[in-house]
Image: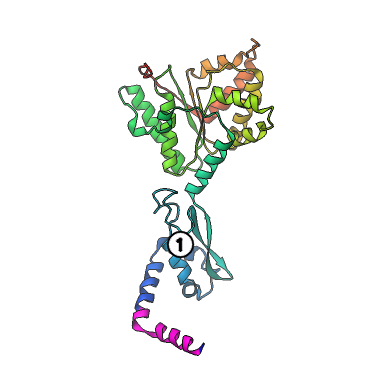
Amino acid sequence: MDPINRTIKQLAGSDRFQERYNAMKKEIVSNTEVQQFFEQHKEELAPNALDQGMIKLYEFINRSSACKSCPSLEQCINTMGGYEPKIIIQSGLIDLEYHRCPRKIAHEEQRRTETLIQSMYVPKDVLRATLDDVELDSDHRIHVHEMADEIVDRLIHDKDHFKGLFIYGDFGVGKSYILGAIANELKKNNRASFILYFPEFLREMKQSIGDQSFTSKMEAVKKSSILMLDDIGAESLSSWARDEVLGTILQYRMAEELPTFFTSNFDYKGLEHHLTYSQRGEEEPIKAARIMERIKHLTIPVHMEGKNRRN
């Protein structure tokens, strides 16, 4: 044991070791995040916290935080893929904890929702869409593109922003494509979103009553970080689907201020008229108005015109 201790002391006293130690210390104390942590917690830290925590701090500055140094979740450079280090204080000294990174959180939310909900039925071109690929061949399409770009920026940088878009227009003008492009831009910035083709989703929810999965599916959809309902108004609604499914989802998202997007062939007024009449022909304007108030609270309307790109 004594020879080992003597070796360590000799190494620590060597010029080469001291040079490397000083260089490492200089790199650590010049790191902005480390500086901010020490400034914020200086009253809690022991006088020797920096020297005692050098190894932990060096590990921290050489790992990726907030996904800055990782091109993707699959190519995460951290020792534990999908987990990032956080500096903590233990008895006045520096320690590290590892937590799920933004990409890991977004990925798990996406997978969890997709496992429960089978009705995405979203075309492949929509799932691959990007804002860069949107054809800007009219003033209307340029305006929609600008609105989409702005809303993405706000959702990424303003944690209090919850307004989505209500994109309406004729068949085949590219409303769903814009929705997919927004979803992919958000994904690049580690924001999970979930697109549902609304008519198929309602059919699945009706079927799920019999297999006891209705409640878990409703919980997953209404609590999605960012929800996108594609083609609302294309379905023939029962009172139950309108009030117990759509109404419940929108009430929760309005109360919690969760970002929600829609596409529709109807504008606000036309959709309200559509929601007024149930499959049985019952006229319920008050219930339709209640749904529309929630949609209006959650969205900014934007009209999309252009040629039918499905032809």
Percent of width and height locating residue 192: 49, 40
Q: Does 234 sit left or right of 175 as displayed? A: right
| In this picture, residue 147 sits left or right of residue 104 | left
Colour option used: rainbow
Q: Nearer the viewer, residue 80 or 26?
A: 80
Residue that appears at 57% across and 37% down: 115
Q: With respect to residue 90, does 13 lie above or below? A: below
Q: Is residue 118 above or below residue 110?
A: above
Residue at 65 percent across and 18 percent down: it is 239
Q: Which residues are magenta?
A: 2-18
Rendered image quadrant of residue 177:
top left
Residue 306 falls in image quadrant: top left
Label 1, residues with CA under 10 Å away: few <14, some 14-19, many ≥20: few
Above-or-below relation of 203 to 222: above
Residue toward you, 288 or 194 = 194
Magenta stretch: helix, strand or loop mostly: helix
Amino acid residing under circle 1: Gln
**Could you say where residue 79 lies in the image, as x and y percent from the top left?**
46, 59
- Residue 46 locus on image (x, y percent): 54, 73
The structure residue drawn at horizontal position 58% and vertical position 27%, both measured from the top left corner, is 294
Outermost top residue:
281
Q: Quadrant location of the C terminus?
A: top left
Q: Position of residue 142 (x, y in %)?
A: 34, 27
Q: Work out whether 86 lies above or below 143.
A: below
Q: Which residue is mark 1?
A: 36
**How many numbered callouts?**
1
User: What secondary structure is found at the residue carrying circle 1?
Assistant: helix
Nearer to us in this view, 278 or 83: 83
Q: Is residue 82 magenta?
A: no
